[in-house]
Amino acid sequence: MKIESLDGLRFLYGPAKERSVLKQLVELDAHCQHFISLSPFLVIASGSADHALDASPRGGAPGFVQVLDKQTLLIPDSPGNNRLDTLENIISTGQVGLLFLIPGVDETLRVNGRARLSTAQADLDLGATEQRRPKLVIRVSVRDAYLHCAKALMRSELWDAPNKVERSILPTMGQMLKDQIHSNAPAEPQEEMLRRYLTEL
């Protein structure tokens, strides 16, 4: 049986729990701001005008995302593969969803809002690090923010040391890419790829 209506969905699950509704904020309170200042990693979700969806990781030193005020975040853009999926989606729709994580903390922080790309000198200055100055920053106007409960990370035991797998459990990234693009060139060794990554961080 396929569920195709909101009524059918709610019949299966029931109403949202009161606390989960009340905790949704329209701005970043002190707890949200503190969480972001400790976070070295987020996933940014975006969508194109024709409803193609994307989720992309972003990382940096804890607090690499700047909180300008209760309504505004700055996310510096770092060098990548130049696909620019997230940035193109922001130009198309101006909407993003953010999921902030802190290693060792099972709760996460979700922030949704409007986004635009900025090359304003003041914004670039705030996004600059010792390594580089970003070409642009993603400026997010917060629409809603809420702390997400720990259940998903508790179920996954994501931060538990015994669950950490050896990288060798998978083929090297070079081998996987070679297979996926059907290349005849030799696969780039993992060590070489990591050395190259380190020059581009």
Image (spheres, helix red, strand yellow):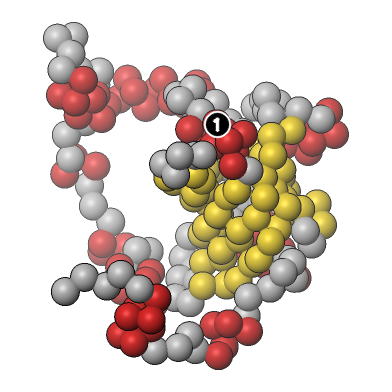
The vertical placement of 184 against 41, above or below, is: above
The structure residue drawn at horizontal position 34% and vertical position 63%, both measured from the top left corner, is: 158
| Structural crowding at the residue carrying mark 1, measured as other residues with C-alpha within 10 Å and reported as few (<14), some (14–19) or many (≥20) | some
* Residue 105 appears left or right of 25: left
Q: Amino acid at mark 1?
A: Glu
Q: Residue at x 23, y 25 (%)?
A: 177
Which residue is painted at 16% across and 74% down in the image?
A: 1
Q: Residue drawn 48% across and 33% down?
A: 85
Horizontal side of 148 relative to 64 (left or right) equals left
Q: Compare residues 147 and 4 and report the one nearer the observer.
A: 4
Frontmost residue, 178 versus 72:
72
Assign a secondary structure to mark 1: helix
Instruction: Give the farthest residue toward the top.
Output: 185
Q: Nearer the viewer, residue 140 or 157?
A: 140
The residue that label 1 is drawn on is 88
Foreground residue among 129 and 156: 156
Indicate the position of residue 84 as horizontal and vertical percent values: 51, 28
Q: How many marks?
A: 1
Q: Can residue 75 be spotted in the picture?
A: no
Task: State the image coordinates of residue 138 (x, y, percent, origin top left).
Answer: 67, 39
Residue 6 figure quarter: bottom left
Q: Could you say where residue 160 lies in the image, as x and y percent from the top left?
A: 33, 66
